Image (tube, rainbow, N blue to C red):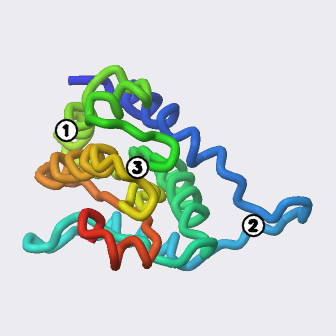
Amino acid sequence: KIPRQVIVNKFHQASHHLLDYIDSFYGVPDSHIKRKETAELLNWIKTPIPQKEEPVALLEGDAGRGKTVILKDLLLELRSTGIPAVGFKADRYYAESLTELEQKVYLEDSFEKMIRSLTASGETAVVLIDQIDALSQSLSAKRQYIDSYNLLVRKLLVIPNVRIILSVRSYDLNYDTDLS
């Protein structure tokens, strides 16, 4: 069993690309736009999921519509409410295997082990994956990248009390079979 605070700290470090994302208009003070989708996703995370439903939500939209800002705001909200969460920008972490992905984000342990440790006491843990479309076949010929994230999601799906949120562009979701 890994101490909770160690996992939370590792998740915070691994989330730095999402946390550092600029969420306002350059040169325009106080231009951050709060979106209703952030509150809707937070409510979904806090609501028990019926047995037959999978704990995965897709944040879908066209380029430039604010998906990354929504996920950053959600990650900050989760942190402030004490719900452990990790947020990855898939366009920043290309990995040919799940082990390589874990090494690139410096977790020093497996995602699965850390999530299981958090959820063993009934606590909810959240995994945010932003810009999964950056790995789509329209942008990358290396299918191992998307395969690594697909494997991560599949491993996490079987763990109780996990919520997974993926952001994806509509075009890629509709035309890439690995994403759909």
Quadrant in the picture for the N terminus: top left
Q: Where is residue 30 in the image (x, y as percent from the top left)?
A: 84, 65
Left or right placement of residue 66 versus residue 86 in this view: right
User: Mark 3 near mark 2, Cβ–Cβ under 8 Å?
Assistant: no
Q: Residues within 10 Å of mark 1 (few under 14, many from 20)?
A: many
Q: Where is residue 173 in the image (x, y as percent from the top left)?
A: 36, 73
On screen, 36 above or below 135? below
Q: Position of residue 13 (x, y in %)?
A: 51, 31
Q: Mark 1 points at which residue?
A: 116
Circle 1 — which element? helix
Inspect the image, locate mark 2, and give the three-letter code of the amino acid beneath it.
Answer: His
Which residue is drawn at the image coordinates 43% and 77% (left, top)? 171
Figure quadrant of residue 178 = bottom left
Circle 3 — which element? loop
Q: How far apart are marks 1 and 2 (CA)?
A: 35 Å
For the residue pair 53 and 144, the one nearer the viewer reads as: 144
Is residue 129 at least partly visible in the picture? no
Q: How far apart are marks 3 and 1 (CA)?
A: 14 Å
Q: How far apart are marks 3 and 2 (CA)?
A: 23 Å
Quadrant in the picture for the C terminus: bottom left
Query: Which mark is in front, 3 or 2?
Result: 2
Left or right placement of residue 162 versus residue 18 in this view: left
Inspect the image, locate mark 1, and give the three-letter code of the amino acid beneath it.
Answer: Arg
Q: Mark 2 points at which residue?
A: 32
Query: Which mark is in front, 3 or 1?
Result: 1
On screen, 177 above or below 123? below
Which residue is drawn at the image coordinates 38% and 60% (left, top)? 136
Q: Mark 3 points at which residue?
A: 83
On screen, 180 above or below 161? below
Inspect the image, locate mark 3, and give the three-letter code of the amino acid beneath it.
Answer: Ile
